[in-house]
Image (cartoon, grey):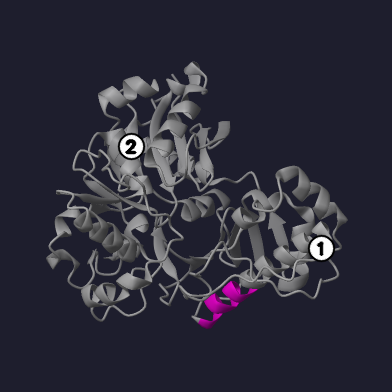
Amino acid sequence: MPALALGVDFGTSGVRLALVNRAGDTLHEQATPYPGPFEHPEAWRQGFLQLLLQVPLELKQQIRVLALAGTSGTLLLCREDGTLLSDGLDQALPYHQACAGQLPEVRRLLGGAGPHPAAQASGSLARALALLDRACELATPGPFLIRHQADWLMGWLLGCWRWGEEGNNLRLGWDLASQAWLGSLTQAPWSSALPQIVPSGSVLGPVAPEVAGDLGLSPECQVVAGTTDANAAVLAADPAPEEGITVLGSTLVLKQFVPEPIQGAGLSCHRVNGRWLVGGASNTGAALLSRYFNSTMLEELSRQMDPEVGTGLQLRPLLGRGERFPVEDPHLEPILEPRPVSDARFLQALLEGITTIEQQGWQRLLELGAPPIRRIITLGGGARNAQWRRLRQRVLGLPILNRPNLTAARGMALLAQGKMEAIMPKPAR
């Protein structure tokens, strides 16, 4: 029976899966919104269950490897068996929520770690401390586990919540260079809540029998440690050294491969398939656009724009207070006024604002030592907007290729597919 690889991406607005064969061809791809608020972990699991039920049985039974991607930094507390807590602690803190009040303790724990994704108000460590403080206020008895979105879901598949993938845990304080937790994290009284870290691409074992039965998967299906959603999108695009990746999804993400690791405020530096991948994520993006316009309106209003002529407005279209990249500032306020009478002009001003942040992001990477990029590959829903591409080309001064069909789910399927030979070699002809 042919063997297939399954990739799953848990994004901000919903879950998407992709199935590829050994040749890397996509055989099936599908997405669905979460059946509940994003902050509710059970909505992630139920969304995946609903989506997998729609995969044809003959394809589902051929899945032999799978990998998950999740939003980088979305964090929760759970019990050692993965069950959620109560009194509001059954909700995750999303990736974009800054916890500036935790910064003094973050800095004490990290010591002289320097610029690191964990040493910020928008880092996972600050959110973890906020969750632990909340549990203490409610006198919620421990022990707890601190897990990111993808790691909690991976634990459910395995029936074991021991592991954490390294890319998802950089913002919690894992250091790639030393392969250890930074500072005094391992001496903290709650250090047993930290996951045991494994590299992306590690084969961790089969799907737990009960879960495999619920999902209709083969008991032979193996779980491969995934990565963050932005990294997964890069894997799908497979850029050349001179190409940068812009993900125009719910948030704006910039990524590029570099010869050596780079550190800086608001930056993340990952190791993906043996290569260093640097980038940053802003709190701007399509999630802000959806507050004002539905998909039909976006299409119609975009056609009314003239992307070659700027509006002259200088908006800062952040999702809320606080920014992560290209500047790390938990107090930075959005600028969404003045709003023009024309909806098309307002949309163009918002797109110009997002593009300005993108421009500043590429400039920031260059200042920190990344090589200059010669071309941009655009992924995500925003890559379907031809007028926005023309606007971005004018502002950024670089050729742009839109590739909306290269999804993070496909990137995860390809990562898992790359491990298939080690798990089940091809039969000899």
* Element class at badge 2: strand
Within 10 angstroms of label 2, few (less than 14), some, or many (20 or more) residues? Answer: many
Give the image location of residue 257, x and y in percent.
Answer: 50, 65
Determine the residue positioned at 44% across, 44% down: 415
Give the image location of residue 245, x and y in percent.
Answer: 59, 61
Give the image location of residue 162, x and y in percent.
Answer: 21, 45
Q: Earlier in the sequence, mark 1 or mark 2?
A: 2
Count of labels in the image: 2
Examine the image and state in which quarter residue 32 appears.
top right
Query: Horizontal placement of 419 versus 96: left or right?
Result: left
Q: Is residue 403 visible?
A: no
Examine the image and state in which quarter residue 355 appears.
bottom right
Quote the CA–CA distance across marks 1 and 2: 48 Å
Give the image location of residue 95, x and y in percent.
Answer: 43, 57
**Stretch of the chain drawn in magenta:** 359-367
Q: Is residue 11 visible?
A: yes
Determine the residue positioned at 29% across, 45% down: 87
Frontmost residue, 249 versus 164: 249
Name the residue beneath numbered marker 2.
Answer: 223
* Element class at badge 1: helix
Locate the N terminus and report the quarter of the image it occupies. top left
- The stretch drawn in magenta includes residue 308: no
* Label of residue 345 in the image: 1
- The stretch drawn in magenta includes residue 362: yes
* Label of residue 33 in the image: none
Residue type, label 1: Arg
Picture layout, residue 30 above or below residue 355: above
For the stretch drawn in magenta, the main secondary structure is helix
Picture layout, residue 160 above or below residue 103: above
Frontmost residue, 107 versus 54: 107
